[in-house]
């Protein structure tokens, strides 16, 4: 399997367009993968964009794979947002979720998928998935047995993570105000993309930041085009993020002088 990236466009928010899908697709394509909300941009598909993805996939005979592991983490409601791609639309769709993000328990290794779309395609896909599930290692029994109790804990686990994300995003927003950098405000998810002057190659900037004790990802790790993007995790403890974004601001101010 080869993953072929397609571009999202930023104009104050990120957009997925049919022309970007069209530019990436080849006759060998089998599926369109969306990450909703996206990692690292934090952008949710809007209803019209979800319609484009499903319509494009159906017309081209492709399946949709919608990774919705971060779906529970939105910073604010948006009536334009597509709630999920797990709908009985015209394309076969595999929609993914899991304990890793919804309960903050990645080490327990339990995820799930909804298979939706035209019933004949769904039946065939489920039959094949059963063979795949039998062929590869199955989900461990203890976590399967514990699942109802883990899911019952979800509201408090989720609330603690969501509060941390909110605090860290606020700290980042405050630290960058009036600087040469722009926060490409995420709508959800666990990370934030910051646009920085492209006067320094991203690799060099993240290495220098590391010397200042600040660990961030360069945008090219996520195929963001060109130089000038940093990706920050919003998940560390707020006191660590507060210190990190203060150092990041000092670094950017030094760079600007
Ligand atoms: C978009 C996305 N999907 C899935 C995963 C992995 O989930 P899991 O731990 O359930 O394999 C990650 C992990 O960071 C992720 O960023």
Image (cartoon, rainbow, N blue to C red):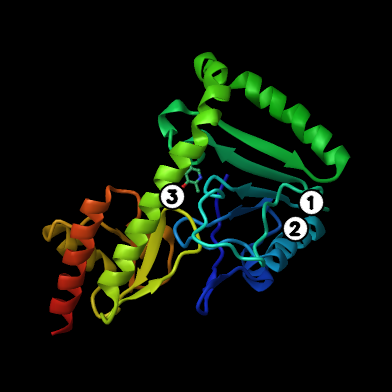
**Image marks 2 and 1: residues in contact by CB distance under 8 Å:** yes
Q: Element under label 2?
A: helix
Residue, x 14% and y 56% (percent of image)?
A: 213
Mark 1 within 8 Å of ligand 1, using the beta carbon: no
Could you say which quadrant of the image residue 151 lies in?
Answer: top right
**Mark nearer the N terminus (2 vs 3):** 2
Q: Residue at x 67, y 59 (%)?
A: 82
Residue displayed at 64% across by 71% down: 17
Q: Residues within 10 Å of mark 1 (few under 14, many from 20)?
A: many
- Of residues 77 and 63, the one drawn nearer to the viewer in this rendering: 77
Q: Is residue 157 left or right of residue 147?
A: left
Pointer 2 with pointer 3, Cβ within 8 A: no
Which residue is the site of mark 3? Answer: 162
Q: CA distance from mark 2 to mark 1?
A: 6 Å
Residue 160: quarter of image: top left
Disc 1, SS: loop
Task: Report crowding for label 3: few under 14, some 14 to 19, many 20 or more residues within 10 A (C-alpha).
Answer: many
Residue 30 visible in image: no
| Residue at the right extreme, as displayed | 120
Ranked by sequence position, the earlier of labels 2 and 1 is: 2
Q: Is residue 50 left or right of residue 7?
A: right
Up-down relation of residue 250 to residue 178 (above or below): above
* Disc on res. 91: 1
* The C terminus - image quarter: bottom left
What is the crowding at mark 2: few (fewer than 14 residues within 10 Å), some, or many (at least 20)? many
Position in image of residue 30 (x %, y %): 69, 49
Residue 116 percent across, percent down from the top left: 77, 42
Locate the N terminus and report the quarter of the image it occupies.
top right
Q: Are marks 3 and 1 in contact (CB under 8 Å)?
A: no
**Position of residue 67 measured from the top left corner of the image (x, y, whole percent):** 58, 47
Residue in front for this viewpoint, 58 or 167: 167
Residue 54: assigned label: 2
């Amino acid at each position: 399997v080869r993953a072929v990236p397609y571009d999202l466009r930023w104009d104050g928010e990120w957009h997925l367009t049919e022309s970007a899908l069209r530019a990436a697709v080849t006759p060998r394509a089998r599926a369109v993968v969306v990450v909703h909300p996206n990692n690292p941009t934090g952008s949710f598909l809007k209803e019209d964009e979800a319609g484009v993805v499903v319509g494009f996939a159906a017309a081209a005979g492709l399946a949709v794979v919608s990774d919705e592991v971060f779906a529970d983490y939105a910073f604010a409601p948006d009536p334009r947002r597509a709630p999920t791609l797990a709908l009985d639309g015209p394309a076969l769709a595999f929609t993914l979720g899991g304990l890793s993000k919804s309960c903050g328990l990645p080490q327990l290794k339990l995820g799930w998928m909804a298979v939706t779309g035209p019933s004949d395609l769904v039946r065939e896909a489920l039959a094949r998935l059963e063979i795949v599930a039998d062929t590869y290692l199955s989900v461990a029994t203890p976590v399967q047995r514990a699942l109802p109790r883990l899911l019952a804990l979800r509201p408090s686990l989720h609330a603690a993570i969501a509060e941390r994300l909110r605090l860290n995003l606020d700290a980042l927003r405050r630290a960058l105000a009036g600087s040469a950098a722009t926060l490409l405000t995420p709508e959800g998810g666990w990370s934030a993309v910051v646009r920085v002057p492209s006067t320094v190659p991203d690799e060099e900037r993240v290495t220098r930041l590391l010397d200042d004790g600040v660990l961030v990802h360069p945008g090219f790790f996520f195929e963001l085009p060109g130089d000038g993007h940093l990706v920050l995790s919003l998940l560390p403890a707020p006191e660590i993020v507060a210190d990190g974004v203060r150092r990041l601001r000092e670094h950017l101010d030094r760079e600007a002088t």
